[in-house]
Amino acid sequence: MGTNKPRGRGRESRVDRAILALLEHTTVEKAAAAIGISDVTLWRWMQKEEFQARLRLARRQAYAQCISRLQQASSAAVGALLRVMTDQGAPAASRVRAAETVLDHAARGIELEDIEVRLSDLERDAEKSSPPEDTEV
């Protein structure tokens, strides 16, 4: 009975909690303590390929949520930049910095659009030039 390896549904629940704890805490020790297991047990779980894959997926999902929040806040950020840039009462250095930021991001946006178009063209050309998959040689 003294095993550290939970089985079945209990393990799934503990593994899910461990993954969440690793995302929320700064160290393995703190994550393990938060869910009531030893840091050695958590370390062992982290050595398993399946656990690593699930942790990577959880990290990607958490990162995607962060990016969504940043995208939602981008309109407010642009508004703030434009207000500072056009505010005659703001210090000149602040207005210039806001203008530089707006121009830099606008240029980067154009570059990204250009890259997307070029990539789409390359993918379309590659599809046209590749032989059909079911052709026997």
Image: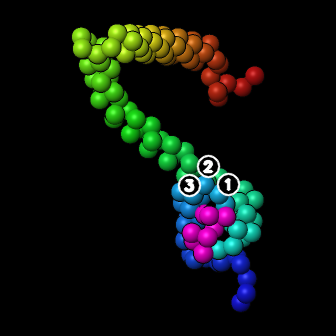
Query: What residue appears at the point 53 percent right and 57 percent down from the top-left corner?
Result: 24
- Identify residue type, mark 1: Gln
Residue 14 appears in the figure:
no
Residue 34 is inside the magenta segment: yes
SS at mark 3? helix
User: Considering the image in quadrants, where does the C terminus appear?
Assistant: top right
Mark 1 nearby-residue class (10 Å; few <14, some 14–19, many ≥20): some
Circle 3: residue type: Leu
Q: What's the residue type where badge 2 is placed?
A: Arg
Could you tell me if the residues under marks 2 and 1 are in contact, i.e. CB atoms within 8 Å? yes
Return the residue at label 3: 23
**Magenta: predominant secondary structure element?**
helix
Q: Which residues are magenta?
A: 29-36
Task: Tell me the residue at 44%/44% (across/down).
Answer: 65
Which one is nearer the viewer's eye here, 88 or 59? 88
Label 2: which residue?
56
Q: Nearer the viewer, residue 24 or 126?
A: 24
Query: Which sits earlier in the primary sequence, circle 1 or circle 3?
Result: 3
Is 98 magenta? The answer is no
Which residue lies under the disc numbered 1?
52
- Residue 6 rendering spot, x and y as whole percentages: 65, 78
